[in-house]
Each structure stands twice: as structure tokens, then as C-alpha cells.
Amino acid sequence: MKKLLLALAMLPLTAGMAAAQQGDAAAGKTLWADELRCKDCHGGVAEGAFGPDLAGRGLSAAQVRQAIRKPWGIMPMFTDVQVSDQEINNLTAYFASMPKPAQPGPWKTEVPANAPAGQRTMISVGCGQCHGNVLIGPRDDMGAVNADINWLKDLVYNHVDGIKRHAQAVGTGNGPARPHMGNFNPDRVTEAQLAQILDWIKSDVGFRAAMRGRLTKGQPGEKGVTYTLDVQNLGLAGKGLGAEGVTVRLVIPEGSQVVAATGAGYKGVRKDDKEQAQVAEWSWPKAGPRDKQSYTITLSKPGTQKDNLRGMIMWEKPMIKPGPTGDQIAIPGAPL
Ligand code: HEC
Ligand code: HEC
């Protein structure tokens, strides 16, 4: 009897603990779909791709935690800054809430036929699942610092701290609050493999100038709404790549007119067939490392969620090696 009472008294506590351990499947689903990048390797609904299927397998929170904190294979490790223990419980609940897939999906990025060795390695150790088949993203940062193997090792093996150091070096703050790439294990992705990847990027594809454009929120005034656009080459002095023959382009929201524009090299407004919109353009002959330009544009009507002011930076040199059309990077929409 005494034992039974004790068991009854403990019931709410253990039930509560079990609930916390079970986690929240809906929160896990949102985390998977909108926040983390696990899906690049494990599939959009955890059906399996480059990494194994996780849905409907009956994995326990302890098993999921072990795979994330102490991965045994090629999967990178994620710290609690990246995925907390509670979030791991939520992910576990999400996996448990789904049926087991009939079969896993394809890799997001497959190794192209006749891929050079460096590209083959890059995709087959997992980088290509998130970065595509020519390491988009990292190539800009490589161009900013003229990357060597020590820089790459820091960003791959100590990513969570390394990305902070890199952001501070190029002057973009402290990097993302929740870095999405994990720390790779040097026993699984070796220094020799990283050197091979770096050589391939350098010789076959080319580093990219680290150009960046940012629009401010539109400021209403007498004549219309004025936006400021800052364009910068984030490259480090003496190290970074310059960009030549730069065109800075803003795509004007439909129904809005350009009332005024300022900044060096303003070329005016014209209809662009590809954008199917009016575009305002500036030219900038040479953007060396650390160079910065500021432009303003005043529109008769502000952009909207659906049709926001946004743009593109394009340059002729240096080019991605296999392409004939120069290089380009998007200017994200202005804050609304
Ligand atoms: C670079 C690709 C990659 C990324 C990113 C990745 N995984 Fe994995 N994951 C793998 C691979 C591959 C395995 C199989 C073991 C191995 O080789 O590491 C694995 C194994 C697992 C397992 C163990 C499955 C089992 O059968 O026991 C879990 C759980 C898991 N991953 C969850 C996650 C979660 C959650 C994330 C995001 C925080 C994530 N993975 C990100 C590639 C990845
Ligand atoms: C889970 C997706 C994912 C995988 C797998 C991945 N990365 Fe990343 N990587 C990112 C993201 C996202 C960033 C931007 C910083 C962040 O959020 O962590 C990044 C940043 C980097 C950076 C720093 C420069 C930059 O662009 O910010 C380098 C270098 C890099 N990755 C190289 C690699 C290499 C090499 C591999 C394979 C060994 C790899 N990555 C695998 C997602 C991934």
C-alpha cells in the first residue's frame, strides 16, 4: 500500500518529465522546415537523401542527441547554440509523428558525371548538399581573404567560432546568431580532402569578389520614399579580390516611378526585358577591396511585400571560369 501511494504521488512528475522528453512535434516540424539545414542532407520531410531517413523510425531523443552531439560518421557536429536539447526533443517528436517513408529521396546535389576530383570530394563529403555544385557562398568569402588551407580548416572544423572570427575580420558583425553549418570531424573529412577542394575551387572555378549590397528601409518624404543602397567590396586590404566593370541594378516595383537618384555613375532608368520591369542602374568601373559606394533612390510609391525594391550587383571581372556572362549577386529586398 505504501509503495502504491508513493507511485501515485510520483505519477504527475514522471508524466511531466516524459512530456518534456517527448517534445513538441509541431515546433519540431517548423524547426526542420524553416530554420535548420538538416533537411539539405536528410530530405524535406526527413525521408532520407544524402543522410539516412529519420521519419517514423522510432528513434529516441537520446539516439538523436548522440547523432547530433557526437556524430559517428561524416555528419558534422552541432553545438547547443545551433540546436538546443529541448529542440532535439522537439525534432524527435516530429520524426515520431510521421510515417516511415517508402523509400529515401535523391541527394539534393549529385556528383556530376566526369566531375574533377576536388568537386567529387566536395559533394561526396556533404558540402555540396548545402552549398550546391560549385560551393556558392564560401567562394565569396574565399575571395575576400584569398583563402588558404588554415582559413578553410578553421571554418570547417571549428565552424561555430570560425564564422564569428571571419565576420569580425571582414566587418560584418559577429556572424549568424545560430550558424547553420556544423563542425566537421577532421578524421572524417581530412585536411588532404580540404586541400583538394580548395585547389579545385582556386584553379577550376575561381574565387569570387565578396560584393555585398544592402538597402535601408524606405524613408517617406515630400517627393516620395527614399531608400539608401550601400554597396561594398568586403575583401580585406592586400588580400581580397577586386571587381571590375561593376553594374549595380535596382528593380523598380510595378506602378512606382523613379523621382530622383544620386550616387556616382548613375546611368538612369530603362525597361529591362529579363526582369520585365523598370530598372535603375549605376556603373562602377573598379571596386577594390574595402571600397564602398552609397546610392539613393526616391520612388513615387514604396515597395510592398509582394513587389519589393530589390536588385543585383553584376561584374565582368573576375568571372566564374566556366561561364560567359560575368558574375552577379543579389541585393536582398529593402526592409519593409
Ligand atoms: C552533411 C549532411 C548532414 C547534415 C547537415 C546533417 N546530417 Fe544527420 N546524418 C548524416 C549522415 C551521412 C548520417 C549517417 C551517419 C554518418 O555517416 O554520419 C546522419 C545520421 C543522423 C542521425 C542518426 C540516424 C540513425 O539512423 O541513427 C540523426 C538522428 C541525424 N543524422 C539527425 C540530424 C539532424 C537533426 C541534423 C541537423 C541538426 C542533421 N542530422 C544534419 C548527414 C547529415
Ligand atoms: C548543413 C549545410 C552545410 C553543410 C553540409 C556545409 N556548409 Fe558550409 N556553410 C553553411 C552555411 C549556412 C554557412 C553560413 C554560415 C552559417 O550559417 O553557418 C556556411 C559557411 C561556410 C564557410 C564560411 C564562409 C561563408 O560562406 O560563410 C565555408 C568556408 C564553408 N561553409 C565551407 C564548407 C565546406 C568545405 C563544407 C563541407 C566540408 C561545408 N561548408 C558544408 C552550410 C553548410
Image (cartoon, rainbow, N blue to C red):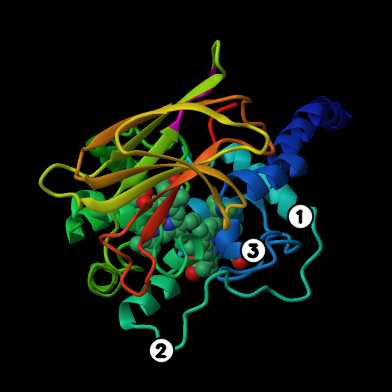
The residue depicted at 61 percent of the width and 70 percent of the height is 49
Q: Residue 163: where, in percent of width, then height?
A: 33, 43
How far apart, in angstroms, are the residues tagged by discs 1 and 2? 40 Å
The amino acid type, in three-letter code, at marker 3 is Gly
Q: Are marks 1 and 3 in contact (CB under 8 Å)?
A: no
Q: Nearer the viewer, residue 30 or 213?
A: 213
Q: Earlier in the sequence, mark 1 or mark 2?
A: 1
Taking the image as shown, residue 250 lies to the left or right of residue 255, namely left
| Mark in front: 2 vs 3 | 2
In this figure, what is the number of numbered marks?
3
The residue depicted at 29 percent of the width and 70 percent of the height is 197
How far apart, in angstroms, are the residues tagged by discs 2 and 3? 26 Å
Dot 2, how many residues are within 10 Å of its Cα: few (below 14), some (14-19), or many (20+)?
A: few
The amino acid type, in three-letter code, at marker 1 is Ala
Residue 96, labelled with which disc? 1
Residue 43, labelled with which disc? 3
Q: Earlier in the sequence, mark 2 or mark 3?
A: 3
Q: Can the viewer see residue 276 in this picture?
A: yes
> Quick one: SS at disc 1?
helix
Report the residue marked by disc 2. 114
Span shown in magenta: 215-219
| Image quadrant in which you'd find residue 296 | top left
Q: Nearer the viewer, residue 112 or 259?
A: 259
The amino acid type, in three-letter code, at marker 2 is Asn
How far apart, in angstroms, are the residues tagged by discs 1 and 3? 16 Å
Looking at the figure, which quarter contains the C terminus?
A: top right
Q: Nearer the viewer, residue 241 or 298?
A: 298
> Quick one: SS at disc 3?
loop
Taking the image as shown, residue 59 lies to the left or right of residue 165, namely right
| Mark in front: 1 vs 3 | 3
The residue depicted at 47 percent of the width and 79 percent of the height is 111
